[in-house]
Image: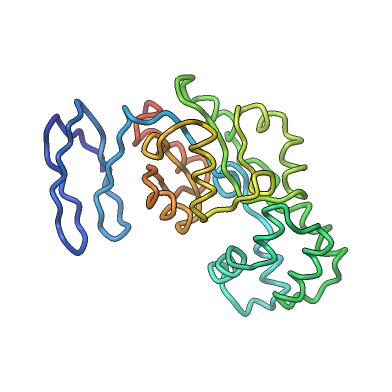
Amino acid sequence: MQFPVQLRDFVRITGDSEVGVLLDLNFLFADYTSREGELRVFLPKMIRVVLFDVGGVLVEPSGVATMLAWMHNNISAEQLWRMWLTSSCVRAFETGRLSPEAFADQVIAEFGLPVPAEVFLEEMTRWSVTLFPGAIELVEQVPPQYLRATLCNTNVIHWKYLMRNKGLSRAFPHHFASHLIGKIKPDAEAFQHVTEALRCEPREVIFLDDNDTNVVAAESLGMQAVRVRGIGEAKQALVACGVLES
C-alpha cells in the first residue's frame, strides 16, 4: 500500500511503542510492509545512490540444492544460508584472504561434504552466474541522476564468470565485490566502504538485497533498504521509493 505524505504531516511507526515523526519535506512516499508491522518511509528526494546486491536480485541463486543434497537434506535452505554467512572459511574466502584450494578443503571439512576438493570447485563455477531475464534492462532504466553500484559477497571464482557478462560489468560504474574490497556483508564496514567511496551519506542510498540480515544491517547504518528477490520485486521497490515511474 502506498500513499503520499504531505508537508509537516506526522507518520506513526508502530512497534513496541509509537513514535511521532515530523516530516519536513514537500513530498515523499510511505509503503506499508508486513515485517514486524512497521511503517517504512522512503525519502526519494534524498536518494542519490541505487545499490544492488547481485546474487538473488540480478543473478539467479544456485548451488543451494547441491549443497543440501551433499548434506543429505538434514538442514533447511535458511539454515544453510546462516551457516554460510557465519562460516569463518567462507568469510575468509569471500574477503580475498583464502585461496580457492584452501577454501575447498576447509569448507568440505566444516560442512561435512562427501566430495573431493576438485569436484566442489568445479561445481562452484556453475553457481550463481546466470542473470535473471530483464536484469540489465532494469538497471538501465535507473535515471542518470542516480549513481548505480553493486555490493555483493562473492569470490574470485564467481566474479570471474560474472564479469564475463559485459552487460553486467558495464551497467554499473561501481562494483564493490567483497573479495576485492576485503569487506563483507552484513559487516558495517562493507556498507561504510561504499558510502566513503561514493562520497554520500547512508540516508542517500537505496539498497536492494535478498537477505534480511543484510537489509537490517544496512538500515541500522541509516540506509534505505529493501529485501527483494528477483527482477519483479526489485522493480516494485524502485517504483515505491520514487526512483522509477510505475
State left or right for residue 70 relative to residue 20: right
Picture layout, residue 83 above or below residue 44: below
Rendered location of residue 187, percent (x, y) = 52, 55
Residue at x 65% of width, y 63% of height: 64
Picture layout, residue 229 above or below residue 213: above
State left or right for residue 85 relative to residue 205: right
Residue at x 40% of width, y 28% of height: 244
State left or right for residue 68 relative to residue 213: right
State left or right for residue 50 relative to residue 204: right
Picture layout, residue 86 above or below residue 139: below
Rendered location of residue 135, percent (x, y) = 58, 35
Residue at x 82% of width, y 72% of height: 115
Residue 67, by quadrant, is bottom right
Colouring scheme, one of rainbow, by chain, secondary structure, one colour: rainbow
Picture layout, residue 238 above or below residue 78: above
Residue 104, by quadrant, is bottom right
Rendered location of residue 150, percent (x, y) = 57, 38
Q: Quadrant of the C terminus?
A: top left
Nearer-the-camera pick, 202 or 134: 202
Q: Quadrant of the N terminus?
A: top left
Rendered location of residue 240, percent (x, y) = 34, 36
Residue at x 55% of width, y 44% of height: 53
How many marks the image carries: the answer is 0
Q: Hey, which residue is sitting farthest top in the picture?
A: 144
Nearer-the-camera pick, 118 or 71: 118
Nearer-the-camera pick, 189 or 153: 189
